[in-house]
Every structure is written in C-alpha cells, then in structure tokens.
Image (tube, rainbow, N blue to C red):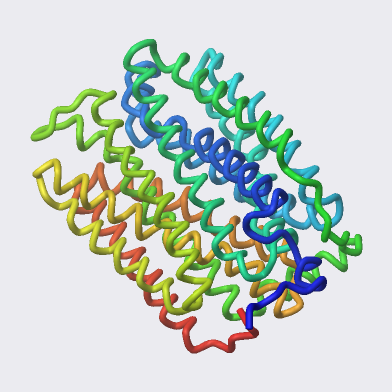
Amino acid sequence: MASTITAPDLDAGHLPGSRGYNRVVIALFAAGLATFELLYSTQAILPELATRFDVTSTDTTLTLSLTTASLAVALLVAGPLSDVVGRTRLIHLSMALSVLCAVGCALAPTWPVLLVLRCLMGVSLAGLPAVATAYLREELHPSTQARAAGLYIGGTALGGMAGRLVTGFTAELAGWRWSLASAALLALACAVVVRRTLPDSQHFTPAPTGVRTMLAMARRAVSDRTLVGLYVIGGCSVGAMVAMLNVVGFRLEAPPFGLGLGAASLVFLVYPLGTVSAASFGRLADRLGRRAVLPVGAGVAVAGALLTFSEWLPLVIAGLGLLVIGFFAVHGVASGWVPARAHAGGVSAGQAASLYTFTYYVGSSVFGSLGATAWAGAGWPGVVGVSATLMCVTGAVALRLRTTRSLLA
C-alpha cells in the first residue's frame, strides 16, 4: 500500500520538494556561505598581511583567532537571546552587521584597528551559527533534518572556500584591501538572498525570560553526556582542520613548492568536497543513524592529515581534500544532532546549539593558533601532529557516544 502523509506530518514542518523547504535550504545555504567566507577571509592572505603590516606569521593568525574567540563569546548570548526574540530576526540582524564590519576591515588604516574590527566581526557573525540548526529542527520535517543540516554545513564549506580563494587571488592582483572588499561584496549579495527567501518561523515558541530560567536551561544543556560529547567533537574537529589550513599557505610558499599567493590559494578548491561530504553524510545519517556515520568521518580526516607529510604536491592536496571531507562529515552530522538530542531530552535547542558553536569556535581559535605555534617550532610535522591528534580525540569521543542512551536521537 502506498504511504501517505497525514496532516499532523505536514504540521511537523516543511517536507523536501515543497516551496517552503526550498526557500529554507536556499536561504541558509547563502547565509552559511556569507558567514564563513567573512570569518575566514583573511586566511589566504596571511602572508600578504605579514608583509604589509610588518608582523610575524603567528601575529597574522590573530585576524582569525580573535574573530573566532569573540564569536564564541557572543554565541553564549546569541543562543539564549534567540530563544526569546526569535530565530529569523537574529539571522537578519547578524547578516547586516557583518557586512558593515567587512567594509570596515577593508578600510582599516592600521594593524590594531584591523584586529579590533575583526573582533567586532566575530560578535556580529554570531547570530547565524547560534540559531541555524535550531531553526532547521523547528521548521523542517523530522525525516529530513539531518540532510538539511548537511546542506547548511555544505554552504559553510563553500563559504570557507570563497573566503580564501577570492581573497587570495584579489590580493595578488590588487592588494589586501581590495581582497577584503570583495569578500564584503559577496556577503552583501548573500544577505540580500537571505532577506528575500528565508521564511518566517512557524513553529518557534518564545522561551520564558529571566536570569534564573536561562541559568537553569544552561545547566540542563551541560548535564547531558551526549551533548557534552558533541561539544567536544565540535571543538576538536574544527581545530584539527584550522590548525592545518592556517599555515598551509606558508608551507606552499616555501621550498620545495615555491608557490605564489594566488597559486597557493588554489588549494582551497578542495572545499567543495566538504559541501558534497556534509550533504552525503547527512543523508546517510537519516538512513543509518548519526552514531554509525560520525566515527567514519573522523577516520577519513586522520588519514588525510597523515597524507600531507608528503613533499609531492598532488599528494598534499589529496590529503587536504580528505581532511576537508572528514571534517565536514563530522561537523555536518554533529551540528544537526545537537538540537535533535536537546529537543528529545527536554533541553533548550537554542541553548544547546549555542554551546556547541561556542566550543566549536573556541577550538578554532585555540587550536588554530596552536597550529601556527607548531609550525614556528617544529615545521609541518608539528602541524600534522596537532591535527591528527585532535581528530583521533574526535573519533574516540564519537565511538564513546555509541554507548550512550539514545533518547530517539
């Protein structure tokens, strides 16, 4: 007998193929692209910034670590705030303020001013990652949430590539200011798309206000072992990737490769693999379960990190590609699991999602700088050691989560 969709099923959220579903996916894909291309817009031009501002390679990574650190702190406010004021309102505000900060970065007259503006960028960006997966859980049908979370993470993967590739080539042709201006222009285009396509929340219910209520929700969000494990996975997995990508430009400019800034930035063309990986592993998670597929992604990333030991460029690129595939598989599954687990356990989805993204960006900031320190002290083997170790921790925690109580998530 052919299956039918009942009215309660339709009320549970947008289904694939519907106009609402397509608008949600397009809007959050564009929002993820803009957020991550702005976040990582300085990564490909770190050598250029070191030359123009006469600072060290470790100093240049502050344009990333300070941004991710301020973003992490802002997430602790943005997540609970979204439980009160709504998801879509915060997303639109975040997009608008981020574009303004991006324009300011392109016009920054001195190194300290650039760093301050990058800090403000982190605060302004917090509105999207704090609420995106919670919005997906509320507005889409449960049968498609893992797949949609993978598509959203796929947008962030393309954003990461755009932020590095566009700025890298523009910097080589016209300088770092025009490279950051190009990033701001792309973000503006995405903000317009989000404004025109993102549907208003239909299933959002404001949470009770008050400091006591928020503290109680926070305690519940850190008392669930599975949620805590997912927070650790977020921080370690992104740290493994950022530690390597922060300094790969310096390695590719040095012997035996000797690439220019534009050519070195081509390595970020591996990022579309992350888009495919996040979407594919999201579909697998809908079919096989998140517990089954998450450790596989960690294993792929470890293999990729080890491959980059090679001094043969194609093998280095292949290793980076596997690292990207593995990371986005892990992140896509884990970030979508958090609000589902929180909802099943009676925890605020916004609070849990903000804590996941908080640890995610703390990991990006701390371990990203650790990668630069390892490069300065031990060269590329030190960077690989940091990256592979963090992904091994990710895999171990993922395997541990297989033994925790399901709660249907």
Horizontally, residue 215 falls left or right of residue 318, namely right
**Residue at screen point 46% across, 14% down:** 178
Image quadrant in which the C terminus is located: bottom right
> Would you place residue 70 above or below residue 260 in this image?
below
Task: Place residue 339 in its image quadrant.
Answer: bottom right
**Residue at screen point 59% across, 35% down:** 119
Task: Place residue 198 in its image quadrant.
Answer: top right
- Is residue 113 visible in the rendered image? The answer is no
How many labels were placed on the picture?
A: 0
Horizontally, residue 41 falls left or right of residue 5, namely left
- Is residue 352 visible in the rendered image? The answer is yes
> Would you place residue 80 above or below residue 125 in this image?
below
> Would you place residue 276 above or below residue 41 in this image?
below
Horizontally, residue 155 falls left or right of residue 385, namely right
**Residue at screen point 55% across, 66% down:** 231
**Residue at screen point 32% across, 19% down:** 51
Q: Extreme front residue here?
A: 1
Q: Position of residue 254 (x, y in %)?
A: 16, 32
Q: Position of residue 177 (x, y in %)?
A: 47, 15
Q: Nearer the viewer, residue 356 or 95?
A: 95
Q: Extreme top residue here?
A: 174
Horizontally, residue 307 falls left or right of residue 237, namely left
Q: Where is residue 20 in the image (x, y as percent from the top left)?
A: 72, 50
> Would you place residue 97 above or below residue 383 in this image?
above
Task: Place residue 32 in its image quadrant.
Answer: top right
